[in-house]
Image (cartoon, grey):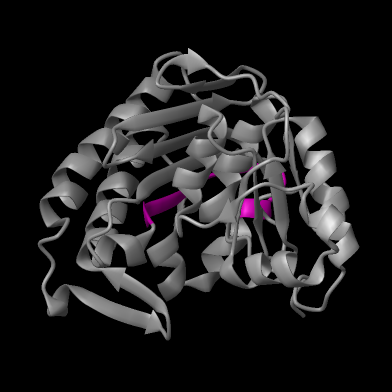
């Protein structure tokens, strides 16, 4: 388990990795530095280099604890099984969340690291690289944004949030007008880490995703819980980092906001929003 100074060591490692592997390559990539893992899903040399540096550094902080990195899973999908093993620990790493933004020269990208024990997230770090914002959460100890404790509050009006393009269209075209007004502006940053930080900062209230890759959401879900909110699957059961990636996730930093978003979501009830089989 993490020692007294280890959370700060993880945060320092993330900052050092971003400074060494990401920022020097930002807006300096060549065509050969970018490739497609599959249509619409790109990876860059920065992703790979950052993941390697993070994995090496995390091995020094907790020797023997395996690292489940996004790029490593691409080569060895069996690594995902480590997340749900009872009684065991693993790190989950997204070395460059928002790769498509990064590759396009857009300054919305992050580094996400979390520690899982007994299939539950117990430590979480999200670093907004361009803006230098860092959120840290430890299970049962709260969440901070740039060192300041965060307690989520229900918004006084219709909550703004982050959802994907297809879900935005569904909300705008399929919801009755009165129910659509229960939600405010919905958009996407195409970077889950940055969206979770926007929720913690109070500039947004919720996020909703159909696909829940653990490196995108395990850290943010712990932060929402530690702020006083929660994350649930589309069937209303609690989110877990080992859940199937088609189970969906709705997250908010307050229980009241989560309940309101969930109620609006239930009205839509479309195949588009149902978990993918």
Image quadrant occupied by the N terminus: top right
Q: Quadrant of the C terminus?
A: bottom right
Q: Residue at x 52, y 72 (%)?
A: 77
Outermost bottom residue = 39
What span is in magenta?
83-97
Residue 186 sits above or below residue 124 on the image: below
Query: Which residue sits at x=87%, y=69%?
Result: 269
Residue 65 seen in render: no
The percent coordinates of residue 122 (x first, y second) are 61, 32
Q: Nearer the viewer, residue 240 or 204?
A: 204
Let me know if residue 90 is in the magenta part.
Answer: yes
Q: Position of residue 220 (x, y in %)?
A: 57, 41
**Residue 116 lies in the magenta-colored region:** no
Q: Hey, which quadrant is residue 150 in on the image?
A: top right
Q: Give the left or right position of residue 12, taking residue 122 as reference.
A: left
Q: Is residue 60 left or right of residue 190?
A: left
The residue under the point 56% across, 29% down is: 202
- Check the image and report above or below for 225 versus 57: above
Is 139 situated left or right of 145 in this image?
A: right
Location of residue 37 with respect to 257 vertically, above or below = below
Q: Residue at x 43, y 50 (%)?
A: 93
x, y percentage for residue 78? Answer: 55, 69
Q: Position of residue 158 (x, y in %)?
A: 73, 40
Residue 197 is left or right of residue 58, and the answer is: right
Question: Observer-nearest residue: 89 or 156?
Answer: 156
Rendering quarter of residue 41: bottom left
Main SS of the magenta part reads strand
């Amino acid at each position: 388990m993490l020692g007294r100074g280890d959370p700060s060591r993880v945060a320092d490692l993330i900052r050092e990795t971003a400074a060494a592997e990401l920022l020097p390559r930002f807006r300096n990539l060549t065509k050969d530095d970018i490739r497609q893992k599959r249509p619409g899903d790109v990876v860059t040399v920065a992703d790979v280099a950052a993941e390697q540096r993070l994995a090496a550094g995390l091995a020094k902080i907790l020797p023997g604890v395996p690292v489940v990195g996004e790029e490593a899973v691409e080569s060895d999908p069996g690594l995902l099984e480590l997340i749900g093993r009872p009684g065991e620990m693993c790190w989950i790493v997204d070395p460059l969340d928002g790769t498509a933004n990064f590759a396009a020269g857009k300054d919305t990208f992050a580094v996400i690291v979390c520690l899982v024990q007994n299939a539950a997230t117990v430590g979480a770090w999200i670093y907004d690289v361009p803006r230098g914002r860092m959120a840290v959460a430890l299970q049962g100890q709260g969440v901070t944004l740039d060192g300041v404790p965060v307690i989520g509050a229900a918004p006084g009006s219709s909550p703004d949030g982050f959802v994907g393009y297809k879900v935005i269209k569904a909300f705008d075209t399929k919801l009755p007008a009165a129910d659509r007004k229960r939600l405010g502006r919905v958009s996407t940053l195409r970077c889950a880490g940055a969206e979770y930080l926007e929720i913690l900062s109070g500039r947004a209230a919720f996020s909703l995703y159909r696909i829940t890759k653990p490196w995108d959401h395990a850290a943010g879900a712990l932060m929402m819980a530690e702020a006083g909110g929660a994350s649930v699957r589309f069937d209303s059961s609690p989110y877990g980092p080992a859940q199937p990636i088609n189970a969906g996730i709705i997250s908010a930093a307050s229980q009241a906001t989560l309940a309101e978003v969930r109620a609006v979501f239930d009205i839509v009830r479309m195949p588009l929003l149902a978990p993918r089989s």
